Amino acid sequence: MDRVLIEGLRVETVIGAYDWERSIRQRLVVDLEMATDIRPAAASDDLTRTLDYAAISTRIREFAEDSHFELVETFAERLAALLRHEFAIPWLRLTLRKPGAVAEAATVGVRIERGQRGESR
């Protein structure tokens, strides 16, 4: 299976377990790796035959705008399920980072994989 990538997508959302976090928007950084077969799109030069990373990026930003979660784990799980369903993605690896959450760390976050990877080449 081939991979389509979105890396370093910055989104703003309400996220956090502390009361003060629930009243502000914070930045999250999304990295996404999605399995697909790019051969049909490459052969036809047709965007509709591949994963449209612009459309997926827009959907991620919309999801973040509308979300209010305490945990990055919840955000990641819900986003992964939404993307797999709406874009028919058989497998994805999602990394979600919350910069500044721990003063001594550049970033903290989670990485999840969902679905079936498919055949390797």
Image (cartoon, rainbow, N blue to C red):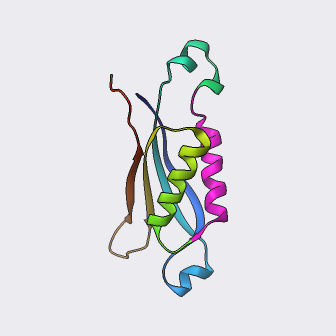
Residue projecting furthest to the bottom: 19
- The picture places residue 32, in percent across and down from the top left corner, at 47, 46
Magenta-drawn stretch contains 60 = yes
Please tell me whether the stretch drawn in magenta is mainly helix, strand or loop: helix
Residue 109 vs 41, above or below: the answer is below
* 110 lies left or right of 87: left
Q: Quadrant of residue 66?
A: bottom right
Viewport quadrant of the N terminus:
top left
Residue 104 location in percent, x, y?
A: 32, 74
Picture residue at 34% right of the left edge, 69% below the top: 105
Percent of width and height locating residue 115: 42, 43
The C terminus lies in which quarter of the figure?
A: top left
- Residue plotted at (48% across, 25% down): 37
Give the extent of the magenta segment: 50-68
Of residues 59 and 103, the one nearer the viewer is: 59
Left or right: where does residue 39 sit relative to residue 46? Answer: left
Kindly identify the residue that appears in the image at 54 percent across and 86 percent down: 19
